Amino acid sequence: MKMKTKTFMSTISIFIIFVLVLSFVPAPLEACTNYLISKGASADGSVMITYAADSHELYGELYYTPAGRHIEGSMLDVYEWDTGKYLGKIKQVPVTYAVVGNINEHQVSIGETTFGGREELTKEKEPNSNMDYGSLMYIAMQRARTAREAINVMTGLVAEYGYVSSGESFSISDPNEVWIMEMINKGPKKKGAVWVARRVPDGYICGHANQARIRQFPLNDKTNCLYSEDVISFAREMGYFKGEDKDFSFVDAYAPLDFSALRACEARVWSMFRRVAPSLNLPDEYIKGNPQAEPLPLWIKPDKKLTVRDVMELMRDHFEGTDLDMTKDVGAGPFILPYRWRPMTWKVDDVSYFHERAVSTQQTGFSFVAQSRSWLPGLIGGVLWFGVDDTYSTVYVPMYCGINRAPKNFAVGVATFHQFSWDSAFWVFNFVANFAYSRYCDMIKDIQVLQRELEGKFLANQAEVDNAALELYKKSPQLARDYLTEYSSQQGDETVKRWRKLGEALIVKYMDGNVKDELGKVLHPKYPDSWYRTIIKETGNRYKVIEKKERP
């Protein structure tokens, strides 16, 4: 059969876009956060997952891959997502679906966090493996119409082609279900991976943050739990487990907890749980580093159902109001900055110390809240609320899954991690955030005013946009795609323009450590009294003003 021109061009376009995406992602995403909200736990019946892609070397942009049709026998080149390294070829499927960022046109969305796991498995990989975690995610979204299909695609690919990444937790959602799947490779001598996937019960929420979380799981409930046939036997073979099958724990076998896993990883899940279900009064002993304390549950039922806005706010967290609050110690400085520059651990007099690791962090490349809605056609029901840079100061812009291109300010190729551009959403948001770090407690208030205005407008307009798209969809799905593409592009353009103006206004208002009031008068606000006391504590009478009567 001869390849048609349109099919050939689609194949070439996908290849070029895939290579471009890889060329701009130079570093591993080893410190991310995902939250999973089931259909029954959301206020409007949406299924939602979140993802913060945190890396000090990640340029945040919105990937787009068009749908395609492929001739029988065609192959797909696979490149390692983190490094761009060529991994090999896999069989292409006849039909692939359009993917916008981390959601496809059928509202299937996938996120991840890396947990690493047993060093003897992850230090060296099986040499002939072709699949890494990033390729699994994006290829699965091109091939799956449901979350279950995505799980089958991902696990089928690693079984056939091997797995080169270390331990990963995946969030996988569609308009009706959301699953957590955990996977780890089998070391340098065995191909593939061991894995387990559990469906989050309807009405419940889940989370993971760089630590495996699935412990015991049902062995005979294929409706709610899937796993590789050797997930237990391989653990026995490696000496990780000796008990009865029913007592097997994926966490204990493949990713045993240490202090870092508890304090830097499980703490982020705990912080979300305590915010959505304060009635549970979850203790903090476990996440403070006591492995003998009662572990966090895999999922909980929130005290009230969550809106999209609620979920956005869950991604904005510095442990405020807890013993881990990053605004309460001297490290926050005089202007209460809830961030700590790396490294996260350090030594003083041969004693090791650490900084807290919160959900909101300065090194986020991009983050999102993926919303899937079963009552709308796929291309309208799926919305990727997409933001770049720090989750606390970003704006989540609606990117409908039916759009046929990424808005120009968010698209691949506008700039790079090493090349600044005012046309790049990533760089404009970094410009504002990095200036705000210099006087954070004041500037963040200005930032939040515009942040809430823009996000509030997007959310308020969502029903109207949905209805307009639905009317066009009845006439022609392509008309709906064109409308949503233009809408998402306009919102992206407006957001970047408004954010650049915000940055200019902040420089004018806070120039040289001063603050201008609403009339433009230059004021000289003092440091907080607590900071003056810190200076006195460190310097004694060095800066004390000697009154006339005290002079010799």
Image (cartoon, helix red, strand yellow):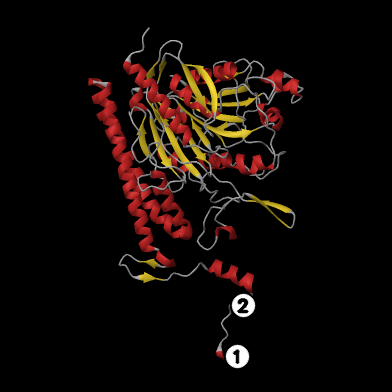
Q: Is residue 165 above or below residue 366?
A: above
As shown in the figure, which amino acid type bears the numbered disc 2?
A: Arg
Which mark is on residue 332?
none
Is residue 42 something one can see in this rendering?
A: no
On screen, 517 above or below 282? below
Q: Is residue 288 above or below residue 376?
A: below
Q: Contact, CB < 8 Å: mark 1 with mark 2?
A: no
Q: Residue at x 50, y 61 (%)?
A: 335
Q: Nearer the viewer, residue 177 or 469?
A: 469
Q: Which residue is mark 1?
A: 551
The percent coordinates of residue 407 (x first, y second) are: 33, 37
What residue do we see at 32% from left, 67% from top?
Answer: 520
Q: Which residue is mark 2?
A: 542
Q: Residue at x 33, y 13 (%)?
A: 4
Q: In whole angstroms, how far apart are the C-alphas of marks 1 and 2?
A: 15 Å
Q: Judging from the image, what secondary structure is the residue with disc 2 in?
A: loop
Amino acid type at mark 1 = Arg
Find numbered disc 1 in the image and state the secondary structure of the residue it sits on: loop
Residue visible at 36% across and 23% down in the picture: 378
Q: Quadrant of the N terminus?
A: top left
- Percent position (x, y) of residue 269? 57, 39
| First reached walking from the N terminus: tag 1 or tag 2 | 2
Q: Position of residue 523 (x, y in %)?
A: 39, 70
Residue 213 occupies quadrant: top right
Is residue 550 visible to us here?
yes
